[in-house]
Image (cartoon, rainbow, N blue to C red):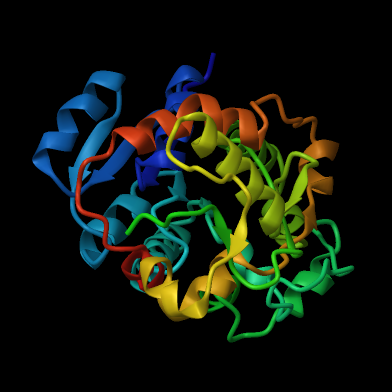
Amino acid sequence: MAPKSSVFLLGPGFIGLEILSELLKQGYSVTTLVRRDEARTSLEQMGSKTVKGSLDDHDVIRYAAANNDITIHTATADHKPSAIAILDGIAERAKSGKSSIYIHTSGCSAITDKSEGKYVSDKIYEDDKPETIDSIADDAPHRQIDLAILGHRKQLGFAGFCGGGKAVWGQVHVSDLAKGYMTILHYMESSSGDEVLKNPYFFIENGDEHSWEKMAAEIGTALHNAGKLQDPKPREIPSGMFGDLFQEWSVAVIGENARNRVNRLRALGWKPQGKSTFDSFVEDELPVLLAEKGEYQGYAAPVAS
C-alpha cells in the first residue's frame, strides 16, 4: 500500500487533538506545531512529530507548510499572520510543481446576523451554494482571514443568555467535527485542484439547532441538579455584566443566529454519530467545569485575539 501523505497540524487542542488521533489512526505522517516543550512529550507519544513555535513564527510555519503535503489549521479562526505563513509555504511548493491541501478552520460568527437574539432568522447558509457564502460582508467576524485564503483561491448566579435568547445556533460534537475534516481531506485527495476550487466551502452541523434561551435553560437545569443553582430558570444577562463574558462582543458571540446546512459532507457519506449537545455537556463538560479552581477573568481576550 502506498504511504499516506504528510500533514502539518496547527492547534493540537480541543479540535486538533481529535483530528490528530484520526490522522494517526489512518496512517498519516503528522507534524504538529507546539508552543511549549512540555507539550511535545504527549504528542510524540501519540505518534506525531513536533516542531516548536507559535502562531507568530512565520518562517517556522512557512517551512513546515512547504514541506508537508497537507496543512490543517485548527488553532484559531482569527490569526491572519499564521494563515499567510501557510499560504507562503504553499506558494513555495507550487513553484516546485508540488500540489498542496490546506484546510482552515473558520467559525459560525462569520454568518451571524443583527437580531440581538430577538427572533429566529429565516436565513440559512448552505455549503453547496457558495455564492451565498461569498456574499458574507468583508467586515464579518473571521472573514478577513477567510478572504485572505480565498484570495489565493466570574461565575454568574443564574443561567443566562444574551439578547432576546430566541436566535438559534447549529450544533456538532467535536468527534463528528474531526471525522468531517477527514472526509474533506479524502475528498480533496481524490479530486483535481480545479474541481476542489469550484467550491472551497464546507459547513458542518448535526441537524440540531437550539436557541440561546433553550441552551441556557438546559445549563440551568444541569447546574441546579448539581446543587450549584437554586433557580434553574434562565434569564437575560444585562449588558452591565458583559465584562464577565465577551465584553462588547458578547451578543455577537453568544446571542445571534448562525444557521447552516451540511449538504456537501452528507453527500460525501459523512453523518453525525457523537452525543447530543446537552448529553455531552452534562456527562463530559460539566464535571470538568465544576472542578476548575483557577481565577475566572472572562473570555474577552481569547475572542479579541
- Residue at 35% x, 64% y is 302
Q: In the figure, is residue 66 to the left or right of 178?
A: left
Q: In the figure, is residue 185 to the left or right of 288?
A: right
Where is residue 33? Give x, y as percent: 27, 46
Q: What residue occupies the far top of the structure in this picture?
A: 1
- Residue at 69% x, 37% y is 190
Q: Quadrant of the N terminus?
A: top right
Of 120 and 96, the residue lying toward us: 120
Q: In the figure, is residue 138 to the left or right of 305?
A: right
Where is residue 114? Give x, y as percent: 71, 81
- Residue at 11% x, 35% y is 38
Where is residue 100? Give x, y as percent: 51, 51
Of 105 and 213, the residue lying toward us: 213
- Residue at 58% x, 73% y is 252
Q: Quadrant of the C terminus?
A: bottom left
Q: Is residue 299 above or below residue 195?
A: below
Where is residue 197? Give x, y as percent: 70, 61
